[in-house]
Amino acid sequence: MGYVAVKGGTKAIQASVDMYKNKKYIPGMEISAEHVKANMNQLINQVMSEASLYDRELASHAIKQAEGNMEEAVFLLRAHRSTLPRLYYSTVTNTREMFVERRVSASFKDIPGGQILGASPDFTHRLLDDSVTYGSEETEGDIPPDYNYELNNLPKVIDYLESEGLFTKEPEDNSTPDDITKRSIEFPSSRSERLQSLTRGQTGAVTSLGYVEIRGYGYSSHPNIGEVRVGQQPVHIDPAGDGDAYYIGDVELTEVEAFMPADEAETAGERAHEKTFKIGYGLTFGQNETKTIAMSVLDYSLSHPAEASPTADDEFVLLHIDSVESTGFISHLKLPHYVTFQSVLDRVRQTKGGRD
């Protein structure tokens, strides 16, 4: 949808821009992008995820420029991303190779490799504490017990269900994924389009629709979190395409596999409606656990749509969780609509005059 700017008022508009850029801050209280990077890790994680650009330096600059406005920071980072050349594609990554920093399962108490609590606010009291100076005290973290597993080679909890025949892996789809950053999403959407849209969706919107789904407007069942993983995922590229890939760095990821009880299709020799488990999947940049869990719920809902469910409608979900699209459209309502409103106003006057 395009809009034509109204002519006139150029000096006033320029003055507004200058005022915004030259706003006075309290002397001595200015913060730098480095301060943002050092102290606002969770905000940076959300901005990187929604902007589809893993770069903590640029995310910090965007947050500072946007004065902490999430939607504006994401808009800035996506706009910058659109100017960058795509030099290489990474090879297919396997999250079993992730160096795990946090790993919890809500489905099993004892899991191969053990529960790793890592850094999380889950176990803290939600009370403001103005006496804490973060980083002023040295603490020794709990040393995890030795389970004879390497942290970059931990088994998946889902392997346990598969070993009991309670879960069957879907056939691998090795086709080239659709890239919604290069081509507009089409409906009905492919799973690669859905996963991309969900991982870059606005955190609050994804969380809210995941909640809607669970409350009874879709699958309406309590999912069980098989595993939440947070860690550093190695990335490799193969510029020559000869299979000789090399390592270029790590990205911090959050991965969720949620178990969903489901009816297995009836096959010969089996009982009808035999119960099994299916999987909802979520993956985001940074430590974004709540959003990733909600993403796994919506992934399952969109892949196994319930009849007449709003959260099973891919167009409804995917177009409305995008923060740049939704914020941009709502914000445009502030811009001049003089001509269109005068037309509406004339019609209202005419109908009212006709009744008189």
Image (spheres, grey):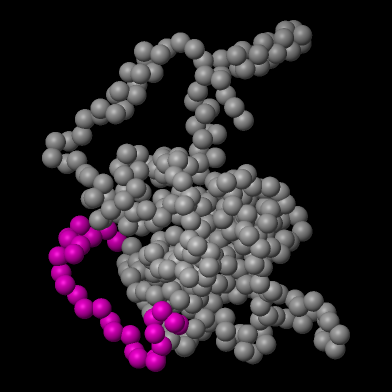
- Quadrant (top left, top right, bottom left, bottom right) of the C terminus: top right
Q: In this view, does 345 lie to the left or right of 325?
A: right
Residue 196 image position (x, y, % from top left): 56, 55
| Residue closer to the observer: 94 or 76 | 94
Does 302 lie within the magenta span? no
Task: Magenta stretch: give its range.
Answer: 127-154
- Residue shown at the point (44%, 60%) measured from the top left: 285
Q: Is residue 13 left or right of residue 221?
A: left
Residue 86 image position (x, y, % from top left): 48, 50
Residue 97's place in the image compared with 332, above or below, is below
Let me know if residue 256 appears in the view.
Answer: no
- Residue shown at the point (49%, 12%) measured from the top left: 7
| Residue closer to the observer: 99 or 114 | 99
Residue 224's place in the image compared with 190, above or below, is below
- Residue shown at the point (39%, 85%) measured from the top left: 150
Residue 172 image position (x, y, % from top left): 66, 72
Secondary structure mostly taken by the magenta-highlighted segment of the chain: loop
| Residue closer to the observer: 229 or 262 | 229
Residue 167 image position (x, y, % from top left): 66, 81
Residue 295's place in the image compared with 229, above or below, is above
- Quadrant (top left, top right, bottom left, bottom right) of the N terminus: top right
- Residue shown at the point (72%, 61%) measured from the top left: 305
Rendering quarter of residue 139: bottom left
Residue 198's place in the image compared with 260, above or below, is above
Does 142 lie within the magenta span? yes
Q: In this view, does 183 lie to the left or right of 238?
A: right
Let me know if residue 318 appears in the view.
Answer: yes
